[in-house]
Image: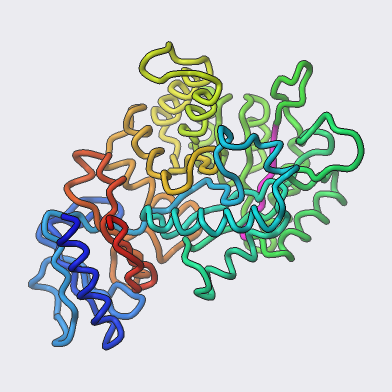
């Protein structure tokens, strides 16, 4: 397989300068919703121009034919929750990353992380906070857009917003950099939101709760009124609000405010998930972050009993599915290694979701929830973000970890199996 794909990419690279029309002939096509056999996909420049039965596709004479024997062609995957300026906490603690790593080091790491994300088949990602790296995600996004570095198409949240006194690092004397921007009340929130928008934020992220209760227990931060204000201010510029929420009350306030997505959702109850379904609020469950943090503390999956946090993730994930909540694919990557993004997809199946539904979540669902109308689907008129994987991921989801081809904006990125 490696030799075949490498040779294939060499042929494509030689042809790409002469023209940019490709005809893909895979064994099957996942179009973002359903799996199809005996489909071809035609790409011209950066756009998908045809997809379907070969008899319905008029192939230009000089198109480069790409035979993907044994493979599935899919839309580029969309990462729902990442932090490109973080790296796994078992390498360096979150506190030490924020406090001791220079801006240059963090940016250099982010560049490496962006490339790893793209090569893993994730052609688009939401980056939900730089965790002390200020607005550098907006600059990273521009560098990718200008073709200076490879990486996923980014939706960035810049600094994220927290209630004063709630976030870290804590326990140090004097002024230290925080992992997010503090803001409170009408004037403070309006100023922070508009400032972040001015610095390039595509989405606004707030922490509806955090570990600042008595004895460091999780507790709500912003009031429902403050969260509603944030939704209104962000919405006036065409942006939406996402919230970190892990407590029942924090989630309740976020739901009442009408946010777009709730990240983590550990405090979810059947009642809250029913309300999320009614209001069209999606859940980004971040299963992998929970398991990763447990492993950093010594938990051995498959050997030790599940930790309370892992058990709770199983419960809320299944409760959300039973309630019909829209579930996004997003693992909180940065807590674990960039480039291993699809680990979240494997866990979603392990936790009870059908593989075809996980594929749907990582493509068409994320595109819809994140306001990306021309991504996440293989349809005429859509942007040509495509990946190929060997075999059928609707049968074996682990295949998504074996990406053999990545196309972004109609440009063949690389053969990542070499």
Asked if the magenta segment contains residue 158, the reply would be: no
**Is 58 or 401 nearer to us in this picture?**
401
Q: Is residue 46 above or below residue 291?
A: below
Locate the C terminus and report the quarter of the image it occupies. Answer: bottom left
Q: Position of residue 337 (x, y in %)?
A: 48, 42
The main secondary structure of the magenta stretch is strand
Identify the residue at image location x=48%, y=37%.
277
Magenta extent: 202-209
Query: What colour scheme was applied to this rendering of the protein?
Result: rainbow
Residue reaching furthest to the right = 174
Return the x and y of residue 280 as percentages of the image width and height.
51, 43
Q: Residue at x 57, y 55 (%)?
A: 110
Q: Position of residue 62 (x, y in %)?
A: 17, 86
Asked whether residue 239 is in view, the answer is: no
Quarter the N terminus occupies? bottom left
233 left or right, relative to 398 = right
Q: Is 127 placed above or below 277 here?
A: below
Percent from the top left, x then y, of residue 274? 50, 30
Q: What count of labels does the image hold?
A: 0
Nearest the camera: 53 or 111? 111
Q: Quadrant of residue 357?
A: top left
Residue at image position (58%, 24%) is 267
**Image vertical order of residue 376 relative to residue 309, above or below:** below
Q: Residue at x 12, y 54 (%)?
A: 70
Q: Is residue 154 above or below residue 214?
A: below
């Amino acid at each position: 397989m490696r030799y075949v794909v490498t040779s294939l990419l060499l042929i494509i690279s030689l042809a790409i300068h002469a023209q940019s029309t490709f005809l893909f002939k895979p064994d099957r096509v996942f179009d973002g919703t359903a799996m199809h056999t005996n489909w071809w996909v035609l790409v011209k420049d950066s756009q998908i121009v045809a997809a379907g039965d070969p008899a319905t596709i008029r192939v230009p004479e000089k198109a480069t034919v790409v035979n993907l024997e044994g493979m599935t062609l899919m839309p580029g995957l969309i990462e729902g929750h990442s932090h490109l300026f973080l790296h796994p906490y078992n390498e360096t603690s979150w506190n030490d990353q924020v406090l001791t790593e220079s801006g240059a080091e963090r940016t250099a790491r982010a560049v490496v992380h962006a490339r790893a994300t793209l090569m893993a088949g994730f052609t688009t990602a939401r980056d939900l906070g730089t965790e002390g790296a200020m607005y550098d995600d907006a600059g990273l996004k521009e560098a990718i857009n200008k073709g200076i570095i490879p990486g996923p198409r980014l939706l960035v949240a810049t600094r994220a917003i927290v209630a004063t006194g709630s976030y870290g690092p804590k326990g140090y004397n004097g002024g230290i950099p925080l992992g997010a921007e503090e803001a409170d009340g009408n004037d403070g929130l309006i100023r922070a939101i508009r400032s972040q928008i001015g610095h390039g934020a595509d989405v606004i992220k707030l922490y509806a709760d955090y570990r600042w209760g008595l004895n460091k227990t999780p507790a709500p931060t912003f009031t429902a009124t403050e969260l509603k204000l944030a939704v209104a201010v962000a919405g006036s510029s065409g942006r939406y609000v996402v919230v970190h929420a892990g407590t029942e009350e924090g989630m309740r306030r976020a739901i009442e405010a009408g946010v777009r997505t709730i990240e983590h959702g550990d405090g979810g109850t059947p009642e809250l998930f029913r309300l999320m379904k009614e209001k069209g609020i999606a859940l980004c469950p971040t299963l992998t972050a929970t398991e990763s943090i447990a492993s950093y503390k010594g938990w051995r999956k498959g050997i030790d009993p599940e930790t309370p946090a892992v058990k709770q993730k199983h419960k809320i994930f299944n409760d959300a599915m039973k309630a019909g909540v829209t579930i996004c694919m997003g693992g909180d990557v940065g807590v674990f290694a960039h480039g291993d993004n699809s680990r979240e997809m494997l866990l979603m199946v392990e936790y009870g979701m059908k593989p075809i539904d996980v594929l749907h979540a990582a493509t068409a669902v994320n595109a819809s929830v994140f306001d990306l109308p021309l991504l996440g689907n293989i349809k005429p008129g859509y942007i040509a973000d495509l990946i190929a994987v060997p075999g059928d991921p609707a049968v074996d989801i682990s295949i998504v970890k074996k990406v053999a081809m990545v196309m972004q904006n109609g440009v063949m990125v690389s053969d990542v199996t070499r």
